[in-house]
Amino acid sequence: NIGGNKLLAAGNQRRGIWGDIVIGAALGPVFSSCSPTYFILLAAVLPAHPLAGLAYLLAYVVGLALLLGLIAIAGQKLVDKLGMASDPRGWLKRAIGALFLLLGIAIIFGLDKKLQAALPSWAFGATSIEQSIDQYTNPAGMPGSNATTTDADITTAPSALTLAEKAVRYQKAPELAQADAYLNTDGKPINLAQYKGKDVVLIDFWTYSCINCLRTIPYLTTWYGKYKDQGLVIIGVHTPEFSFEHQESNVADALKRLGITYPVALDNEYQTWNTFGNQFWPHEYLIDIDGYIVHDHIGEGGYDETEKAIQAALAERAERLGMDASGIATSTASFADPDLQAVQSPETYFGASRNQYLGNGTPASIGTQDFTLPTTAPYANTLYLGGSWDMELENATAAGADNTVLYYYSAHDVDFVASADAPTAVKVLRDGKPVGAAAGTDVDPVTSTVTIQGQRLYNLIHDETPGPHTIELQIEGSGLHAYTFTFG
């Protein structure tokens, strides 16, 4: 701070562009330390991906410096042309001083927060570069990306709030966009307007091959069975990550396999996703009887808080409709949740559009490549392929007769999103040996083999010890499409 003050003094003494540069140098560290983008780069991108982090940091600094330089030059020229208006004792400076005085008074009495609540949420949203960096460092569905938006939590019983108080505290839920298809509704369209004033609605953004989404399903199905007769409506908004998830038949099969009976809207064009300004799978939004989002949660975890928010919203509904609320459960559901602290491996994509963890061959390159597995110990969290693979944007397709996959991971579970043109047997080895008792639910523990055909997520390893271990897949024949490894 002392050094910065000295620089500021030196800048003030100088006139012209060099003085502006000195002032910028003094203020730069202060501005940078307050910048969310700068913090994300230093705390997330740089440690995980040093080269990418340095590139982003350089682009950020260059762009920021150019913009601030242009502002300084233009500002100086503007001040020079203002004449009397630039007089410290002139009318303009007095008006600006009065404006800042009024703003200070508004902040003291909390009027700024009321104004912010009245404006659309996008007016105070993150910038696009911060959103893109966040998705790069914490791709949707990655373990560890869980967070709760505390502003939307129910901290006061909703029934104790007037509609005017709700309007200040909560955001109105936007309407659902027209879906590509509706499942579990006999094909009938659904919207939020039909439930307003009648029911409480829980919106779940998900996609059926996302492991983080799948681990929330037992809670959602339990809540639906527990509260549907007391006014809870759950709507799954299925927004696909991969092209095969656009197919209605694939989603319908997933609903049967997962035991989902609540309505699901197919949001193939991301219309509802964009309307809500959503960025993550999974993401739950709880909407009260008045149409306000009174609680929302990103990712896994926080199940007790979400269920208690459901109970509070249902109690308010019962009071508003003159119904008995004593039958609303106060207990919360609990399942054996995975130990996400043990997950040290990121979601790893095979397709050329996102295969930055590819350890051999050429990442981000489309077309057929011949791969050779390393003869030395593999690097952690690095994908190695063996044999001939056709690299496409979303997936890598086994193009030869003998193809292999090798990955050094640290987690309890290994899941594999894949499909095949015909039933394809894949031998699964852990540390070079059959998986045995560590076989996942889709692997035969006797033969250590999984048969892949349908376009879905396959659980390959479920291990009590989180690793590190290597997983090796030995693929019989060609035609297997590999999309991603996920870990739990």
Image: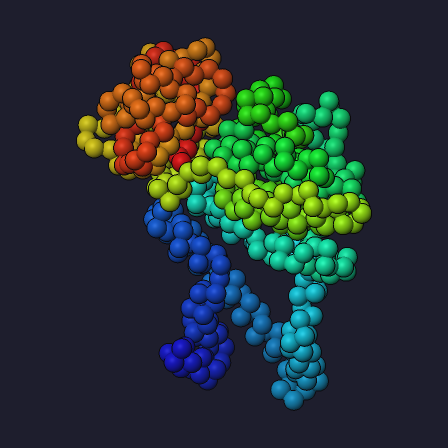
The picture quadrant where one finds residue 484 is top left
The percent position of residue 166, horizontal first and vertical second, equals 72, 57
Residue at (67% x, 62% y) in the render: 116
The percent position of residue 473, horizontal first and vertical second, equals 32, 21
The quadrant of the rendering that contains the N terminus is bottom left
Between 135 and 469, the residue placed more toward the observer is: 469
Between 214 and 275, the residue placed more toward the observer is: 214
Can residue 475 be seen here? The reply is: no
Q: Is residue 49 left or right of residue 66?
A: left
The picture quadrant where one finds residue 207 is top right
Between 26 and 213, the residue placed more toward the observer is: 213
Farthest residue toward the front?
326
The percent position of residue 421, horizontal first and vertical second, equals 47, 13
Residue at (62% x, 49% y) in the render: 309
Residue at (27% x, 33% y) in the render: 469
Q: Is residue 409 above or below residue 312?
A: above
The quadrant of the rendering that contains the C terminus is top left
Q: Is residue 1 left or right of residue 330?
A: left
Farthest residue toward the left?
376
Between 149 and 224, the residue placed more toward the observer is: 224
Q: Is residue 133 above or below residue 257?
A: below
The percent position of residue 443, horizontal first and vertical second, equals 37, 19
Farthest residue toward the bottom?
89
